[in-house]
C-alpha cells in the first residue's frame, strides 16, 4: 500500500470529514453490528480476518451523519477513509455522470487506499446519510496485517509439498507473495521457477498468464 506523508494523510482525512458530524456511536454499533459484520465477511480482504479481529476493528470505527447533497469525497482527491453506508442513499459519479447508487450496507473508498491512487470517482449524498468510517492509516494497518497472515499461511503450505524442496529461498519468497491466488496459478509459478526444461519463451508465456490471472482476480 502506498504511503502518503503524515501531514498529507491527515489533510485527506480531515477534508473528507468536513461535511460530517460525529455522533455517539455506542447505541448505533449495537444496532448495526450485523450489518457491519456482513460487510466485513463479504469484503475481498477483510473477510480473511478472524471474527475476533473483525469485532475489534468494528469497535474502532466512527459513526457520522452527512446532510443531503454533500460530497463525501471528490474524484481526483487523495484518499482519506474507508466507508460503510449505514443509512440513506448516495450516488457515485465519474466526470460528473452518475454511474451507481449506493444504499444501506454498501461500502466504498477502499480501492484508492488499496492501490495507492487518487479517488477514481466522486461520492455525493442524495438524502441525509449515516456512515461508518475508518481512516486511511487504520485501514492500511488492517490490510498489512491480513497480508502478513496470508504470506505466513502460504509459506507453511508450500513447506509441506515435496515438489517445492528444490526451490531457492528467493523463489519460495516470490511464490508466497502471490497472495490469494488459486492453486493452478501457484502451480504455474512453481513450474516457471523450477522446471529446467522450459526455455525463456515458455517461461515468459507462463509469467504473462500468471500476471493476467492475478490482475483478473484483484481487479
Image (tube, grey):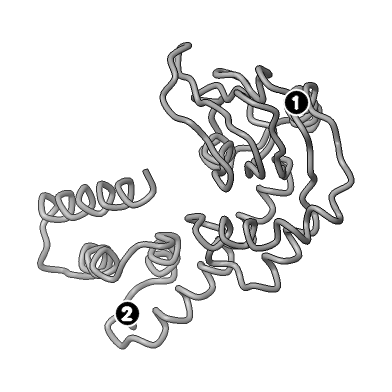
Question: Is 77 placed left or right of 26 in the picture?
Answer: left
Q: Which of marks 1 and 2 is nearer the N terminus?
A: 1
Is 25 placed above or below 147 here? above
Residue 113 placement (x, y as % from top left): 59, 38
15 and 203: which is toward the camera: 15
User: In the rendered image, which quarter contains the N terminus?
Assistant: top right
User: Residue at horizontal 70%, vertical 73%?
Assistant: 52
| Count of numbered circles in the view | 2
Instruction: Residue 6: name its quadrant.
Output: top right
Residue 76 placement (x, y as % from top left): 56, 18
The residue lying furthest to the top in this view is: 96
Q: Which mark is residue 164?
A: 2
The label nearer to you, 1 versus 2, is 1
28 and 201: which is toward the camera: 28
Residue 201 placement (x, y as % from top left): 10, 49
Is 116 placed above or below 55 here? above
Is 11 placed above or below 203 here? above
78 and 93: which is toward the camera: 93
Question: Is 23 placed left or right of 131 in the picture?
Answer: right
The residue lying furthest to the right in this view is: 24
For disc 1, the neighbor class at 10 Å (few under 14, some 14 to 19, many from 20) is some
Instruction: Residue 129: name its quadrant.
Output: top right
User: Residue at horizontal 58%, vertical 44%?
Assistant: 104
User: In the rendered image, which quarter contains the C terminus?
Assistant: top left
Disc 2 on helix, strand or loop?
helix
Q: Which mark is residue 8?
A: 1
User: Residue at horizontal 61%, vertical 54%?
Assistant: 143
Residue 127 placement (x, y as % from top left): 64, 26
Amino acid at each position: 500500500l502506498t504511503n502518503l506523508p503524515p501531514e498529507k494523510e491527515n489533510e485527506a482525512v480531515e477534508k473528507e470529514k468536513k461535511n460530517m458530524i460525529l455522533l455517539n456511536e455506542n447505541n448505533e454499533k449495537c444496532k448495526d453490528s450485523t450489518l457491519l459484520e456482513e460487510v466485513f465477511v463479504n469484503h475481498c480482504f477483510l473477510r480473511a480476518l478472524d471474527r475476533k479481529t473483525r469485532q475489534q476493528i468494528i469497535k474502532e470505527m466512527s459513526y457520522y451523519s452527512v446532510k443531503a447533497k454533500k460530497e463525501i469525497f471528490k474524484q481526483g482527491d487523495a484518499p482519506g477513509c474507508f466507508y460503510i453506508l449505514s443509512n440513506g442513499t448516495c450516488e457515485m459519479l465519474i466526470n460528473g455522470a452518475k454511474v451507481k447508487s449506493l444504499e444501506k450496507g454498501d461500502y466504498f473508498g477502499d480501492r484508492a487506499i488499496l492501490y495507492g491512487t487518487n479517488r477514481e470517482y466522486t461520492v455525493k449524498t442524495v438524502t441525509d446519510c449515516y456512515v461508518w468510517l475508518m481512516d486511511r492509516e487504520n485501514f492500511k494497518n488492517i490490510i498489512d496485517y491480513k497480508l502478513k497472515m496470508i504470506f505466513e499461511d502460504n509459506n507453511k503450505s508450500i513447506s509441506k509439498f515435496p515438489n517445492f524442496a528444490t526451490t531457492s529461498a528467493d523463489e519460495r519468497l516470490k511464490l508466497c507473495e502471490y497472495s490469494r491466488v488459486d492453486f493452478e496459478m501457484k502451480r504455474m509459478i512453481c513450474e516457471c521457477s523450477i522446471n529446467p526444461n522450459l526455455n525463456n519463451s515458455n517461461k515468459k508465456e507462463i509469467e504473462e498468464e500468471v500476471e493476467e490471472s492475478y490482475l483478473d482476480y484483484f481487479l
